[in-house]
Amino acid sequence: MLPSFELLMPETLPEALEMLAGYAPDAMPLAGGTNLVPDLRGGKRRPGVLVNVHGLDALQYIGRQDRYVVMGAGVSLADVLESELIGAHGRVLQEAARVFANPLIRNRATVGGNLGNASPAADTVPPLLVLDAELKLASAGESRWVGLEDFFVDVCDTICRHVELITAVRWLVPPPRTFSRFRKLTLRKSTAISVVSVAVRVTLGESGRCVDAAVALGAVAPTPIRVHEAEEVLRGEALTPEVIDRATRFACTAASCIGDVRSSAAYRERVTDVLTRRLLAEAQEWSEEQWERS
Ligand SMILES: Cc1cc2nc3c(=O)[nH]c(=O)nc-3n(C[C@H](O)[C@H](O)[C@H](O)COP(=O)(O)OP(=O)(O)OC[C@H]3O[C@@H](n4cnc5c(N)ncnc54)[C@H](O)[C@@H]3O)c2cc1C
């Protein structure tokens, strides 16, 4: 059963921020409710006040601003999947949206809610980490941009203050000759939480060598993580099997895998190896095609 709470229905973003400030720390934003409503039913969260931000116009856009792709936090996973702009400049995020839950949840669930919930298995996070995304945190009268890598503190814990709302996400349009992909392993084909997820971004230089790289893992640690050691291995190198092997081994070492209801720690470590290796091998094939074309 749902516990009792007061539901506030702001019509504008400034109104929503005033409400959060007025009732802090007892108020929480409610977006699609696909995490929050089950959490309320299960007694995991007990806010006295919910501020409904779902459908606020100011949070519903995907566009290009200067060198950035920017989207409002209220954008749904279905919107991400349909966006041509994200397809062109954030394919890795679109791949995560494609395997996110099921069509019903994708229509309702928002990117802001996925980030704000701060699950280690949140599927938008590894893609946004490899895109070097930033989040806009707004409170009544002020706002700040923070790097996504600095946002998560622990399981379901972030630097977002009670009076703040994630209002937007942005990342720089990746340079030409950038490859970015996402894979996750789940216990069934849809409507399933990731056992392990991996995102990879590789940018090639004129010589065909990797000039920039990013590797991120989900569901293997208290928060999604970037694996900087693996990225260092890739930078400046051609993507050979030896380089891929070394980078993959760093990814496995970085993953402090835990055992839980979905998987043993040993199986998670094995899956981290397989998915990372596969994505980097795809990047290698892609880099060879680029080289042949040029
Ligand atoms: C059947 C099912 C399948 C699922 N499958 C997946 C999956 O495949 N991958 C996956 O990653 N997740 C999955 N989820 C989890 C969930 O759907 C996502 O995390 C979703 O993106 C949450 O978004 P929401 O809009 O529903 O957030 P809500 O449930 O409304 O909110 C979630 C949390 O974020 C906070 N919040 C919401 N908006 C903001 C904001 N703008 N700023 C700050 N905090 C905010 C809320 O206060 C709350 O703490 C699944 C859930 C269900 C029920």
Image (cartoon, grey):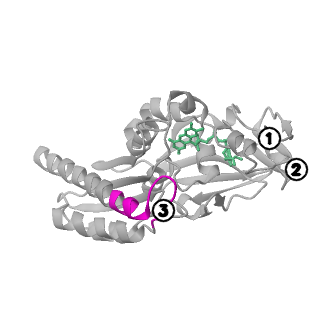
Residue on which the image places disc 2: 23
Mark 3, other Cα within 10 Å: few <14 / some 14–19 / many ≥20:
few
Residue on which the image places disc 3: 259
Depth order, front residue of 141/79? 79
**Is the shortest distance between ligand 1 and the CB of mark 1 under 8 Å?**
no
- Label 3 or label 2, whichever lies nearer to me, is 3
Residue type at the position of mark 2: Tyr
Sequence-wise first label, 3 or 2? 2
Q: Distance of mark 2 from mark 1, alpha carbons?
A: 10 Å
- Label 3 or label 1, whichever lies nearer to me, is 3
Q: In the image, is residue 35 above or below residue 126?
A: above
Q: Position of residue 291 (x, y in %)?
A: 14, 50
Side of 232 where 219 appears, left or right: right
Residue type at the position of mark 1: Val
Q: In the image, is residue 158 above or below residue 140?
A: below
Q: In the image, is residue 217 above or below residue 96?
A: below
Q: Residue at x 81, y 35 (%)?
A: 10
**Residue 9 can be seen, yes or no:** yes
**Residue 235 can be seen, yes or no:** no
Q: Position of residue 281 (x, y in %)?
A: 22, 54
Residue on which the image places disc 1: 51
Q: Position of residue 73 (x, y in %)?
A: 62, 42
Depth order, front residue of 18/243? 243
SS type, badge 3: loop
Q: Position of residue 259 (x, y in %)?
A: 48, 62
Q: Quadrant of residue 217?
A: bottom left
The magenta-colored residue range is: 257-271
